[in-house]
Amino acid sequence: MAVISHWINGQIAPTGPDTRLGEVMNPATGIVSGQVALADRATAEAGIRAAAEAFPGWRDTSLARRTAILFAFRELLNARKQELAEIITAEHGKVLSDALGEIARGLEVVEFACGIAGALKGGFSENVSTTVDVHSLRQPLGVAAIISPFNFPAMVPMWFFPVAIAAGNTVVLKPSEKDPSAANWLAALWQEAGLPDGVFNVVHGDKESVDTLLTSPDVASVSFVGSTPIAKYVYETGTAAGKRVQALGGAKNHMLVLPDADLDLAADAAVNAGYGAAGERCMAISVVVAVESIAEELVAKIAERTRTLRVGDGATEPDMGPLVTAAHRDKVAGYIDAGAEAGATVVLDGREDVPADGFFLNPTLFDRVTPEMSIYTDEIFGPVLSVVRVPGYDEGLELINANPYGNGTAIFTNDGGAARRFEREVEVGMVGVNVPIPVPVGYYSFGGWKNSLFGDTHAYGDEGVHFFTRGKVVTSRWLDPSHGGLNLGFPTND
Ligand code: NAD
């Protein structure tokens, strides 16, 4: 059975009889497709060392050369994205077109990073005091650790590493052990694009490798994406060790539908954003907040569309693939009982007529969900959509703002004034107006509020450049004979 091992210093690290291994499955068949090496401390340290040793050379590589490699990486990735999409589908389960979609969003960040030269420009002020000039620099940090979740094995690492590398840092990526192959494929692509060995390393593993990254004195920054409890742990442990940390957590995204909305558009959006990628998206809509006067009609339209969805092996291009593991499928299925027992109306039960092999669950729809039910409070991360009915806009807004998560949200309305009020009043980091999954484009920045992000820096765009660099201000004076002599006073503005 193939062992997926670490990529350290430009090559696959050997494994031995003592190497801990995890299973990698094809979720559509339930068959084990490979084994992934789980790094111990020494192996994770070897990855960090490779990155630390490559840093001085990469930092000092000219901006022109660095961006030329970025452009080459972009071209190769675009030309070979189908190959990567097939790897993602085989280990994650998502539909092939959706895997291509996540690569497209990652490519956007690569393209943004191709223009890093503009983003790294500093300021200059001439003659701030007589013959004294001031200019600013942004310099790379060193070794950047990236720890990513299973649900976007290519896109989430690409939220960070293009910017980190373009800015002159070196990287250790610790991908999810559930779908590790995409990371190695990307590492080999970097090598083909001309990136020097050691600049991009992949260490596979679990808590042991994460803890090594969080505490190593040679790691300067940590970019984490995953569930909220682990994000909080990573933030607290990493910052206690003196690192710069951005830790993106879980979500419970609400979509508020006002009575004047186009209900067909809203129903399409709820189905697409609720069940796409089997609900395993951090920006998935999991709660539709429907104003009572249109709730009945909206639920009927959502149910009608949901019944037409085809569930199957992602490689055969159905509407929805399986969940990532059997354990996760069973956990999500457990919420269907929990919701019914708590008194929600089960409009569609996803446990009926599921394919026999693989980790499948059909789309589930609940109506009349209330905020104390576990199907409302918990991030289910599966194809389960809950409808909460509210009397009007104010109660809808109040519900969304009371939720401890604040990743994404959307409002569906034809009233510009209501939409404007919503975008100003809602306490969520990414807001859609008649757009259900408002993931910012590569030159803005991605990040939630509250329990969806620990740290204050969002991913990619200008905030990404800021995260992966530190500022320096230089005050310089070139000797002028008129400025000699002793003066113990504080410098003045003359
Ligand atoms: P997870 O938290 O289980 O794992 C994320 C990473 O942390 C993995 O690399 C994993 O190996 C590591 N990890 C797991 N347990 C750990 C522990 N005890 N100590 C140290 N490291 C540990 O998340 P997941 O199940 O892979 O991904 C799904 C979660 O990610 C969902 O909660 C989803 O909302 C979230 N997510 C958030 C965003 C966002 O932008 N906010 C994006 C994608 C996914």
Image: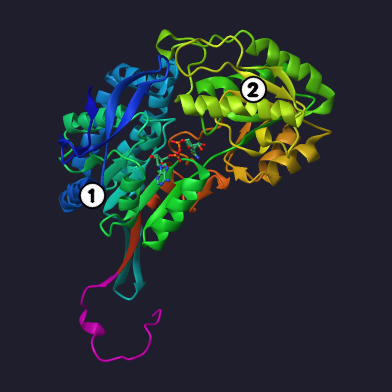
Q: Is the CB–ligand 1 distance for label 2 below 8 Å?
A: no
Q: Quadrant of ligand 1?
A: top left
**Residue 438 in the image: above or below residue 241:** above
**Residue placed at 72% from the left, 20% from the top?**
346
Residue 132 is situated, as x and y percent measured from the top left of the image, at 30, 73
Residue with the mark numbered 2: 270
The residue that label 1 is drawn on is 48
**Relative to 313, 2 lies left or right:** left
Asked if residue 227 is among those painted magenta in the image, a careful observer would answer no
Secondary structure type for disc 2: helix
Going from N to C along the chain, the mark reached first, 1 or 2, is 1
Residue 262: in sight, yes or no? no
Residue at the extreme front: 17
Helix, strand, or loop for circle 1? helix
Quadrant for the C terminus, please: bottom left
Closer to us: 418 or 48 = 48
> Mark 1 against mark 2, which lies toward the viewer?
1
Is residue 320 shown to the viewer in this render?
A: yes
Instruction: Estimate the x, y position of residue 458 in percent, counting from the top left.
Output: 47, 46
Badge 1 amino acid: Ile
Of the 4 image quadrants, the one containing the N terminus is top left
